[in-house]
Image (cartoon, grey):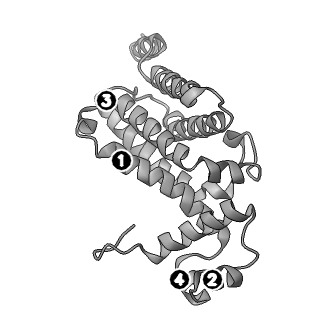
């Protein structure tokens, strides 16, 4: 991110230098001291922004998300989208950002525990935090528009963001191994995944049956 004078922040310089080191050398810097010496910054300056190399990687994944969301929301038609369309817009934009950083992602992917949706990976800690904020925002809107049914058991609805996150991890892992032209299969997966999730969370005949049962129970003699 640039400041008011158009200069890149130290945080972004560190991230850029870290990614360049990984891609050029094929391994992480041996130490923060060595990394700072190459960047010509002090260790104190480094620790003002990050506590470790792991923290840089968390920032990278968070950055992929925030950049995609900012770009998606900047579309003139975004505010007129349904919630389903907003999520689709985010995923398609996110995939474009991932494509632009595929070399870095592939370089690090062997170190990430898979399947992604079943493991906790430190790299995704910050990404997961901001994604859940986004998912809860979408779900709140979806309940207002009735794209998602307000169900009687709160514990079930509390798990909805987990469903969105699991889908996100599945899409990422699928894309990494996608060999189709222009990653067309990943685009198809996004469309089918989002539609399936919203079809499951929307009102269904089962909801009508439960409403009927509740009515009969409350009005029994």
Residue beneath disc 2? 36
The answer to which quarter of the image holds residue 50 is bottom right
Mark 2 secondary-structure assignment:
helix
- Precedes in sequence: disc 4 or disc 2: 2
Q: Where is residue 131 in the image (x, y as percent from the top left)?
A: 49, 49
**Gap between marks 3 and 4 measured at Cα:** 41 Å
Q: In this view, does 40 lie above or below 195?
A: below
Residue beneath disc 3? 82
Question: What crowding class fits label 1: few (fewer than 14 Cα within 10 Å), some (14-19), or many (20 or more)?
Answer: some
- Precedes in sequence: disc 1 or disc 3: 1
Q: Where is residue 83 in the image (x, y as percent from the top left)?
A: 35, 32
**Gap between marks 1 and 3 measured at Cα:** 17 Å
Q: Residue 71 carries which label?
A: 1
Q: Nearer the viewer, mark 3 or mark 4?
A: 4
Q: Residue at position x 42%, y 12% from top?
A: 208
**Gap between marks 4 and 1 measured at Cα:** 28 Å
Residue beneath disc 4? 48
Q: Residue at position x 36%, y 75% from top?
A: 7
Question: What crowding class fits label 3: few (fewer than 14 Cα within 10 Å), some (14-19), or many (20 or more)?
Answer: some
Say if mark 3 contacts mark 4, CB within 8 Å. no
The outermost residue toward the front is 24
Say if mark 4 contacts mark 1, CB within 8 Å. no
- Precedes in sequence: disc 3 or disc 4: 4
Q: Nearer the viewer, mark 3 or mark 2?
A: 2
- Precedes in sequence: disc 3 or disc 2: 2
Question: What crowding class fits label 4: few (fewer than 14 Cα within 10 Å), some (14-19), or many (20 or more)?
Answer: few
Q: Residue at position x 52%, y 57% from top?
A: 62
């Amino acid at each position: 991110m640039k400041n008011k004078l158009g200069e890149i922040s130290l945080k972004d310089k560190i991230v850029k230098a870290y990614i360049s080191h990984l891609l050029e050398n094929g391994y992480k810097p041996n130490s923060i001291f060595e990394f700072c010496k190459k960047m010509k910054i002090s260790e104190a300056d480094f620790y003002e922004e990050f506590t470790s190399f792991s923290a840089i990687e968390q920032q990278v994944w968070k950055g992929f998300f925030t950049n995609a969301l900012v770009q998606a929301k900047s579309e003139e038609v975004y505010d007129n989208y349904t919630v389903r369309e907003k999520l689709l817009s985010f995923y398609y934009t996110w995939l474009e950002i991932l494509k632009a950083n595929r070399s870095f992602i592939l370089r690090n992917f062997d170190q990430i525990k898979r399947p992604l949706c079943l493991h906790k990976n430190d790299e995704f800690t910050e990404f997961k935090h901001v994604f859940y904020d986004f998912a809860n925002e979408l779900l709140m809107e979806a309940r207002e528009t009735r794209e998602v049914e307000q169900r009687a058991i709160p514990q079930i609805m509390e798990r909805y963001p987990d469903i969105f996150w699991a889908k996100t991890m599945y899409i990422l892992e699928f894309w990494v191994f996608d060999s189709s032209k222009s990653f067309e299969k990943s685009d198809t997966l996004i469309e089918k995944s989002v539609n399936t999730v919203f079809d499951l969370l929307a009102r269904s005949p089962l909801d009508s049956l439960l409403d009927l049962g509740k009515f009969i129970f409350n009005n029994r003699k």
